[in-house]
Image: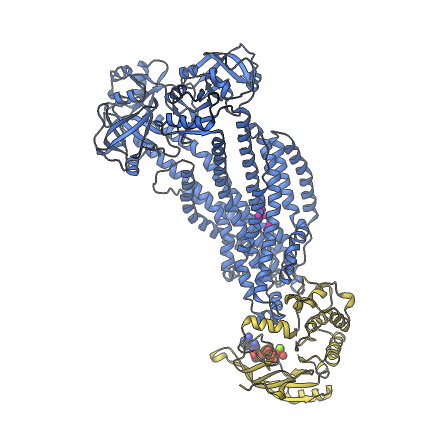
Chain colours: A yellow, B blue
């Protein structure tokens, strides 16, 4: 509907009145109920909200992993509604990065191979300097030859983060990346994500339940019943806890 | 627990079907073979029973011994014996009959040569009842020297009808024209087991078949109130000692037994192929159930944790196996009826035509199908099922996927030991001729050893064979890693293909060596320029007059006819060749060791050095040989020879000696050399011209003969490989099945790959390359094993005429490449499934 304008140039992704309905007839669920939001380039955004509020759904729709029922989704200037499966795949491969809650790595590949996976799928080689930077940033230089089964959960998530960054994606999406980690591993991963934003200007959108994690973000968006209900800029953990209490989540 | 098992089945119908099909194909071969065998036996039994319907007793020459190849023409007896039999009290009718060689020509003058079946000339019985089921379908019975009646099948196929004229060639070589006056049927059948039949009145038959005043047998009908046994005794009393009287039951029994014996070779062969398919199918079942058990490790552990007993788990898995087995048996039984049709076609291709009747499905066949289908499935599922019961309940709580099994030590030790014993045995068998025992045991040990160690070989093979694939990009590299991921699974999937390919390649080595040996024999042993044979492999031969006709040609040097028969020496049956001593040396080198072939006289014989040694004979000894029709005769051993490759007979006699003892008068082969200075093609042209009247004689120069022999071997090889192809097909089904299960297992991984940017095309390529790799491993192992085993087998058969070991290079390579490439086909469905994996669902699944 609304074509991108010059004022939106530094928007990495945005949704316009996005609605996502699951199921039919009696069992209809409005997972997203008219969400309009911009994600600024170079910013670290956290999405919070009670369970079932539509956080994952929003992320999946943004990433083209799921289709929206109505409304629009843009990655940069690209409206992803009309893209074919193959175009979506290439979009994900070349312009997006992912970190999921669990199961981020291909078990047969070493850490290094997992990191290079998206590039290799594109038939490209990693820029060695950038690769080194990323690997150094995750602090896994001595673990590159190991397979996922030989890495701890936290290390696996950091490998996943490195993989997500290695293509220099326009946006990195992370869905509860610390969900399965202890507090120390969480802190390490979050530190890494923070550095990616600060030092490389990476755009990150992260879903989380953890107020401490959200506090590392530049901006926190609250969802409830598929709608945006609150938004905070650079909040502290305490601010976030207060907001959560208000939401009753 | 049954409910758990059955729900599991219902949820995976396609896989159930796929698994069942692998066994069903093997079962279908078993049932097909039984059905065809039963159908053929029933058909022929009925045919012969009907034929002999009106004949209570048959008088015929008493053979000294019987042996399938000698069942040709019996020794004739004088026609006045018929009158003597007719006078025996209780005989209502007695009629002499005669059977011989009569080759009919079609309307364009080409010989009507049924594949494999004989071309018969017979006397037509005047007494309708003695004719049995023979009836005139059209026209009337032949009477007088110019009339003939022919079988309905020939009439139908070649458009003959009463009123036509038909040309017929006889043993004498002279074609003669006859008025076709009648068409004969045999009960429901249009011909007698595929043979063509020309019927004349008795006098004419005797004339044209070259036996005036003689009959082969006398058919006798009893008057009412006298039993066949009683009549038989009465008739036997008036017969000379060398004749016998037999009842209808005896004749029918003999005919039936002959059919069964003739068929037994094929049924055994077909059942052998069925066994191979079942073995491969068993591998597949084993593999499928192993994967299922591995995948359901957590489910089983959970069941155990909540109180399921081991026995219950075992029962649950075996229930699934029973269901698969039952489905397989049922499918196999149905398919078997189709297969029996296919096998009948194969038999027709090698010249055994079976009249079409209703298929015989006997209860034994159904039982066999059930037993085989269920049995193989259960046995193959037993170990995986047992493994399922070993899953500790704690595994339910562990996140870890199925642990990577290491090979049990027993397996490695056993496999290593078998290879350590098998490989030297094989090399020893390859190093020398006729080491059959070593070849067989060595092959078996090496084969089983390889299969046991295969999982250990998978990683290195994947590394080597996968190297070029990995270079193709990420999809290739992932494929390589996936193929090496569960070595056991890859190994047993590939093993199924290995079995098929091993046999195919081994057969090819043996066949190639066989062809090379034939060619070698021709170069070494044959001195003739032309070889004349009957046009059809199974036709009895060439009229002797043909050779006479050639002798007068100026282009011809010598003409040397050869005939063959069987004799018994000290109770053992052996082949005897009849040659013309005056010319034989000029056309063949038989490696005379003592005495002289050219000096071989009537009443003398030569034997191979081996035979003479075995019986302790010296040159000049008087030796008793037993001939099938004339019994024991004492002949003088005139000399010995070594080379049986051209003649294929352990004994040699002269043609006059042969004619005294055998009733066959046709030359099986005639070898011809050119007169001095005559080029081969000129010789061939003039011989062909001279034999224009002998339409069924094939004139071949040595190159053509060689090619024809090679073509026969190739045809046989093609047939065998077509049957083995079934095993390869089943193995490919196994690749499909394993891949499909693997795709299912890796849904999350595939989803992840898709999420981070793997295109559908890349997913498909990945699965495809994995399939190719697995197939390549099977093919490479199979080719290597097949070459080794084939070489050992070829060497072991040195005594059977495979004197040269020739290892084909191109063919096995082609098989290996085609086998590997077939992986692409096997990957189609699994790859499509993998590409369709729902990314989101796979990624968010817990
Ligand atoms: N595939 C689906 N089919 C039907 N309903 C779905 C589906 N996926 C999600 N939903 C529903 O949509 C709503 C939003 O789900 P979503 O996964 O986005 O929640 P969330 O905010 O990520 O929750 P959590 O914090 O538990 O991960 C929920 O009510 C959920 O039940
Ligand atoms: Mg969620």
- Quadrant containing ligand 1: bottom right
Q: Residue furthest front?
A: B677
Q: Image quadrant of residue B158?
A: top left
Q: Is residue B534 left or right of residue B499?
A: left
Screen quadrant of the C terminus of chain B: bottom right
Q: Is residue B668 left or right of residue A111?
A: left
Camera-side residue: B485 or A23? B485
x, y percent for residue B756: 63, 70
User: Magenta includes B495?
Assistant: yes
Q: Is residue B272 left or right of residue B251?
A: right
Q: How many marks?
A: 0
Screen quadrant of the N terminus of chain B: bottom right
x, y percent for residue B458: 66, 51
Q: What residue span does the magenta drawing correspond to?
A: B493-498
Q: Can residue A207 be spotted in the picture? A: no
**Predominant SS of the magenta segment:** helix
x, y percent for residue A180: 69, 73
Camera-side residue: B616 or B576? B576
x, y percent for residue B793: 58, 34
Which residue sits at x=50%, y=59%? B14
Q: Can residue B222 be spotted in the picture? A: yes
From this view, report whether residue B217 is shown above or below residue B315: above
From this view, report whether residue A248 is shown above or below residue B719: below
Which residue sits at x=47%, y=17%? B583
Which residue sits at x=63%, y=45%? B451
From this view, report whether residue B232 is shown above or below residue B156: above
Camera-side residue: A209 or B124? B124
User: Magenta includes A154?
Assistant: no
From this view, report whether residue B822 is shown above or below residue B474: above
């Amino acid at each position: 509907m609304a074509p991108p304008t010059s004022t939106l140039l530094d928007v990495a992704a945005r949704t316009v009145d996005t609605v996502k309905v699951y199921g039919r007839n009696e069992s209809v669920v409005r997972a997203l109920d008219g969400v309009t939001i911009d994600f600024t380039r170079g910013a670290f955004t956290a999405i919070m909200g009670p369970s079932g509020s539509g956080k994952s759904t929003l992320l999946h729709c943004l990433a083209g992993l799921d289709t929206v029922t109505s409304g629009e989704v843009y990655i940069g200037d690209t409206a992803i509604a009309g893209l074919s499966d193959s175009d979506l795949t290439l979009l994900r491969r070349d312009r997006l990065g992912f970190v999921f809650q669990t199961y981020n790595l291909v078990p047969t590949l070493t850490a290094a191979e997992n990191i290079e996976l998206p590039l290799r799928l594109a038939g490209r080689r990693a820029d060695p300097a950038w690769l080194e930077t990323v690997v150094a940033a995750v602090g896994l230089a001595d673990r590159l030859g190991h397979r996922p089964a030989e890495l701890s959960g936290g290390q696996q998530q950091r490998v996943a983060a490195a993989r997500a960054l290695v293509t220099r994606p326009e946006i990195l999406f992370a869905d509860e990346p610390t969900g399965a980690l202890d507090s120390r591993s969480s802190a390490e991963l979050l530190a890494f994500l923070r550095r990616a934003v600060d030092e490389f200007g990476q755009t990150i959108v992260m879903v989380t339940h953890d107020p401490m994690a959200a506090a590392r973000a530049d901006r926190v968006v609250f969802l409830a019943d598929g709608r945006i209900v609150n938004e905070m800029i650079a909040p502290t953990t305490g601010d976030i806890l207060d907001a959560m209490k208000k939401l009753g989540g | 627990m049954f409910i758990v098992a059955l729900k599991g089945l219902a949820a995976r119908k396609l896989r159930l079907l796929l698994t069942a099909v692998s066994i069903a194909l093997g079962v279908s071969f078993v049932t097909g073979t039984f059905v065809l065998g039963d159908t053929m036996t029933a058909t022929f039994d009925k045919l012969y029973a009907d034929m002999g319907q009106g004949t209570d007793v048959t008088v015929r020459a008493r053979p000294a011994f019987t042996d399938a190849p000698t069942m040709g023409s019996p020794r004739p007896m004088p026609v006045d014996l018929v009158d003597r039999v007719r006078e025996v009290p209780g005989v209502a009718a007695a009629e002499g009959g005669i059977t011989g060689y009569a080759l009919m020509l079609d309307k364009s003058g080409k010989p009507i040569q049924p594949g494999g079946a004989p071309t018969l000339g017979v006397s037509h019985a005047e007494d309708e009842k003695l004719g049995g089921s023979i009836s005139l379908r059209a026209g009337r019975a032949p009477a007088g020297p110019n009339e003939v009646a022919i079988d309905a099948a020939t009439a139908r196929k070649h458009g003959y009808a009463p009123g036509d004229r038909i040309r017929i060639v006889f043993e004498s070589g002279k074609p003669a024209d006859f008025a076709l006056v009648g068409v004969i049927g045999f009960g429901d059948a249009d011909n007698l087991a595929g043979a063509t039949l020309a019927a004349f009145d008795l006098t004419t038959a005797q004339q044209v078949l070259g036996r005036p005043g003689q009959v082969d047998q006398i058919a006798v009908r009893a008057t009412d109130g006298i039993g066949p046994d009683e009549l038989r005794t009465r008739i036997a009393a008036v017969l000379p000692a060398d004749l016998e009287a037999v009842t209808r039951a005896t004749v029918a029994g003999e005919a039936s037994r002959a059919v069964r014996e003739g068929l037994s070779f094929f049924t055994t062969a077909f059942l052998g192929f069925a066994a191979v398919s079942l073995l491969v199918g068993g591998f597949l079942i084993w593999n499928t159930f192993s994967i299922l058990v591995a995948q359901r490790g957590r489910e089983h552990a959970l069941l155990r944790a909540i109180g399921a007993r081991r026995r219950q788990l075992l029962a649950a898995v075996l229930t699934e196996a029973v269901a698969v087995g039952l489905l397989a048996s049922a499918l196999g039984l149905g398919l078997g009826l189709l297969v029996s049709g296919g096998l009948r076609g194969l038999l027709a291709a090698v010249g055994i035509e079976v009249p079409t009747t209703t298929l015989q499905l006997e209860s034994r066949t159904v039982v066999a199908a059930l037993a085989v289908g269920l049995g193989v499935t259960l046995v193959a599922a037993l170990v995986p099922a047992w493994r399922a019961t070993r899953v500790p309940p704690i595994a339910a709580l562990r996140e870890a996927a199925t642990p990577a099994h290491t090979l049990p030590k027993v397996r490695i030790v056993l496999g290593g030991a078998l290879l350590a014993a098998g490989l030297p045995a094989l090399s020893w068998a390859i190093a020398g001729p006729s080491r059959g025992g070593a070849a067989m045991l060595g092959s078996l040990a090496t084969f089983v050893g390889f299969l046991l160690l295969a999982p250990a070989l998978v990683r290195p093979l994947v590394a080597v064979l996968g190297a070029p694939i990995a270079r193709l990009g990420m999809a290739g590299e992932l494929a390589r890693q996936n193929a090496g991921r569960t070595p056991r699974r890859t190994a047993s999937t590939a093993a199924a293909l290995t079995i098929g390919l091993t046999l195919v390649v081994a057969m090819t080595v043996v066949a190639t060596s066989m062809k090379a040996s034939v060619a070698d024999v021709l170069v070494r042993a044959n001195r003739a320029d032309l070889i004349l044979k009957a046009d059809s492999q199974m036709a009895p031969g060439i009229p002797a007059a043909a050779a006479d006709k050639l002798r007068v040609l100026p282009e011809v040097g010598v003409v040397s006819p050869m005939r063959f028969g069987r004799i018994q020496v000290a109770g053992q049956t052996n082949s005897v060749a009849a040659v013309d001593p005056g010319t034989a040396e000029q056309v063949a080198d038989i490696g005379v060791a003592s005495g002289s072939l050219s000096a071989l006289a009537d009443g003398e014989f030569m034997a191979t050095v081996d035979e003479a040694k075995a019986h302790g004979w010296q040159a000049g000894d008087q030796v008793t040989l037993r001939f099938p029709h004339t019994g024991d005769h004492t002949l003088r051993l005139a000399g010995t020879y070594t080379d049986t490759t051209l003649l294929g007979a352990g004994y040699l006699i002269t043609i006059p000696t042969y004619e005294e003892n055998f009733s066959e008068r046709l030359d099986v082969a005639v070898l011809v050399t050119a007169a001095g200075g005559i080029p081969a093609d000129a010789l061939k042209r003039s011989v062909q011209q001279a034999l224009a009247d002998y339409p069924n004689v094939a004139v071949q120069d040595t190159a053509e003969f060689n090619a024809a022999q090679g073509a026969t071997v190739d045809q046989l090889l093609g047939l065998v490989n077509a049957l083995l192809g079934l095993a390869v097909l089943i193995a490919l089904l196994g690749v499909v099945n394993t891949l499909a299960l693997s795709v299912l297992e890796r849904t999350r991984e595939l989803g992840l790959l898709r999420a981070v940017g793997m295109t559908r095309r890349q997913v498909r390529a990945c699965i495809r390359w994995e399939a190719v790799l697995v197939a390549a491993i099977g093919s490479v192992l199979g080719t290597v094993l097949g070459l080794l085993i084939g070489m050992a087998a070829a060497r072991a058969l040195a005594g059977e005429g495979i004197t040269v070991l020739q290892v084909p290079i191109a063919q096995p390579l082609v098989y290996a490449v085609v086998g590997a490439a077939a992986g692409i086909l096997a990957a189609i469905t699994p790859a499509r499934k993998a590409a369709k994996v729902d990314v989101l669902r796979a990624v968010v699944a817990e």
